[in-house]
Image (tube, helix red, strand yellow):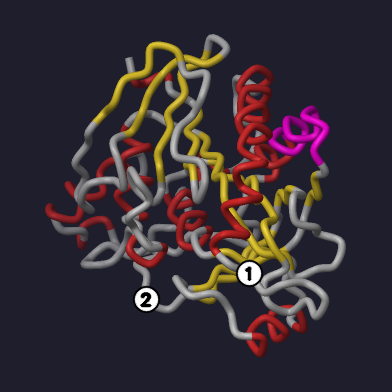
Amino acid sequence: MEDDIKLAIIGGSGLYSMEGLEGAMECNLETPFGQPSAPIVIGTMNGQRVAFLARHGVGHHIVPAEVPYRANIYALKSLGVERIVSISACGSLREDYVPGHIVIPDQLYDNTKNRASTFFGEGLVAHVGVADPFCPDLSKQLEEAVRATNAVVHPGGTFITVEGPRFSTKAESNTYRAWGMSIIGMTAAPEAFLAREAEMCYAVMAHVTDYDVWHLSETPVTVEMVVQVLNKNTSIAQTAVRQLVKNLESERDCDCGHAMATAIITQRESISKESRKKLNLLVKKYI
C-alpha cells in the first residue's frame, strides 16, 4: 500500500493537518533515529497517495532545534516517498518580499549550531553534493501550483536557517541582509540536506509572515503576527498542494534520485554490520 506514496507534505507553523486527504489513516513508525515528530497521515488526493507530517508535532510542542529531522526523513523514505514539499513560515529580508507573499527559494544558508545534519558517521562516511539544495524540478512544479492560486509568488532567493527558537536581533537581521539573504526561518536546515542524502526531491513553499526586525517602519516580528498571516495563507497552501498533486509529473526528471551514487567514501569492506543495517534503506543499492 505505502510503496506508491510519491509525495509527502511536511507542515510547519500554522499547518498541522492536510485538508482533502480521503481515506486518511495514521501511521506510527519507529526508525533507527527514533520516532518522527508525529504520526504520519496517509491518504488519497486527486487519485494520488499523499503523506502528511506535522513537523512540530500535534499541538506544536517541538521547538525547531528539537525536531527529529532524521527520523522524519527516514520514516518518509521508508514509506516509498520520492518527493517532499515543506510548508514553512519565514521572515522577509527584502523589501519586495512582502508579508503574505510566498517564496520558492533556490538556495540555502545553514546558520544553525546544534543539529545533527547527516545520517552518516559512526563508521560509514559519505559526502553528498548540495550545491543546489532544493530540487529545481519540484520547485518549478510547486511554483506553478502556487501561481495557479493567484497568490503572489517569488521564484528564487536564499533561505537562511537560524537556530531559534528566539527571533533575530537587529544586528543579526541587518547582517543577514548584508550577506544577501532573502528570507529567514528555523527549519529548512538540516531537512533539505537529509532529504538529499535520502535521494528525495525537496522544495519549500515559504510563507512570508513578517519583515523580521530590520524594517524601520514595520513592527518587529511577534508570534501573533506570524500566526495571523499563516491563518490567512492556510487556504492558499492547501489549494496549491491539491493543484501540485493533480499535475505532478509521474517520473522524476532530476538528479535527486541518485545523489548518493558517488558520495560514499568508506571502503565497502570497512563498513560494519551495524552501519550497514542502520543505513540499509539509504545505501543498499550502492553497497
Q: Is residue 27 above or below residue 108?
A: above
Q: Is residue 142 magenta?
A: yes
Seen at 38% across and 29% down, the residue is 80
Say which quarter of the image contains residue 137. Answer: top right
The residue segment tinted magenta is 141-151
Residue 242 location, x and y as percent?
62, 23
List the single residue furthest toward the bottom: 171
**Percent position (x, y) of residue 13?**
50, 51
Q: Decide which of tag 2 and tag 1 comes sooner along the chain.
A: 2
171 and 136: which is toward the camera? 171
Q: Residue at x 64, y 39 (%)?
A: 254
Q: Is residue 233 left or right of residue 14?
A: right
Q: Which mark is residue 221?
A: 1
Residue occupied by mark 2: 114
Residue name at image x 57 percent, y 59 percent: 224
Identify residue type, mark 1.
Val
- Quadrant of the snapshot with the N terminus: top left
Who's the residue at 57% across and 45% down the image? 87
- SS at badge 2: loop
Residue 61, disc: none
Along the viewing direction, whichever of 77 and 281 lies nearer the viewer:
77
Q: Quadrant of residue 280?
A: top left
Q: Nearer the viewer, residue 168 or 163?
A: 168
Q: Residue furthest left?
A: 273
Q: Residue 123: name its quadrant.
A: bottom left
Q: Is residue 210 left or right of residue 118?
A: right
The three-letter code of the residue at mark 2 reads: Asn
- The label nearer to you, 2 versus 1, is 1
